[in-house]
Image (tube, rainbow, N blue to C red):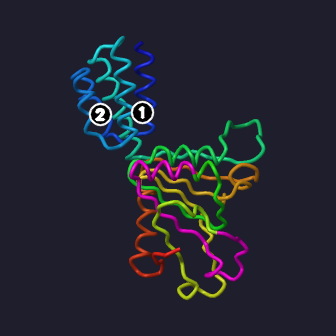
Amino acid sequence: MSDTAAALASALAARLPAADLRELSAAAAAGRPGLLALRARSAANVLRTACDQLLVLLGSCSPDYLAGALAGAADHAADVARSGSVDIVWTGPHSGLTIGRLTSAVVVDLIGEAVEEVLLVSYASQTEPTVSAALHDATRRAVAVTLLLERAADNPSYTGSGFAFPTLTARRLAWPGTRRPNGAALHAKLLVIDSSVALVGSANLTGHALERNLECGVLLKGGPAPASIRRHLLHLLEADVLVVSPS
């Protein structure tokens, strides 16, 4: 079962920060009581799920081995957080040169991994069902969701209609037409997760863009860029360039 333990540690390193991995390592070293105690005090569903997976492995793997695998994963996660990694995400036809995942699948997975915050920015936006379900699940995990979406009220050239994610509990931001240059559009497409992961690309938050169009995005994990993107947008809010929208 050592390969299974190593594979689980690697999978957890892709989803959790180094601090959480070290906490799991310390709990695993204490065996079943340690993991049960960590599970009981953890508010994050992803951490409780990790405890459940490790408890299963304890039946065939020593606590020391599990703890060591997790400690190694924590060191790797810390290295990634310092240096960052860059991947390309595609929507559209396959070239045969790379193996890509649909943008929609990446967006849903990233939202599902959020522990504290989801920041989503889009020009054209629809209530795409799988993204909507992922956002609602995030709010049930007590993840704070912030949406910055273009509005026809602020951009006469915007042809979108309707109100995206009408039942979602979220902080909704807007860039008022009175606070932007004449003819300017809110055209960014961004997803930032917990200030540590960012997807920056061409895809709007629509079914065609996420699943059918030829779209390209850059997935940034770790490093300073995700937090820098978040800080920039929040600074625009503090400077009253962006505003909290009642709708």
Q: Name the residue under label 2.
A: 39
**Do residues under tags 2 and 1 come within 8 Å of each other at their CB atoms?**
no
Q: In which quarter of the image is residue 175?
A: bottom right
Q: Quadrant of residue 180?
A: bottom right
Residue at image coords 78%, 44%: 93
Whole-percent x, y for residue 36 in the image: 27, 28
- Assess disc 2: are there few (<14), some (14-19) or many (≥20) residues with their C-alpha within 10 Å of its C-alpha: many
Amino acid type at image mark 1: Leu
In the image, residue 175 above or below residue 232: below
The question of residue 36 being in magenta is answered with no
SS category of the residue bearing label 2: helix
Label 2, label 1: how many angstroms apart (C-alpha)?
A: 15 Å
SS category of the residue bearing label 1: helix
Residue at image coords 63%, 70%: 187
Whole-percent x, y for residue 86 in the image: 53, 46
**Image: magenta residue range:** 133-162
Q: Name the residue under label 1.
A: 12
Along the line of sight, the residue nearer the viewer: 243 or 187: 243
Left or right: 16 in relation to 86: left
- Assess disc 1: are there few (<14), some (14-19) or many (≥20) residues with their C-alpha within 10 Å of its C-alpha: many
Left or right: 11 in relation to 97: left
Quadrant of the image for the N terminus?
top left
In the image, residue 43 above or below residue 116: above
In the image, residue 240 above or below residue 7: below
Return the mark for residue 232.
none
Amino acid type at image mark 2: Arg
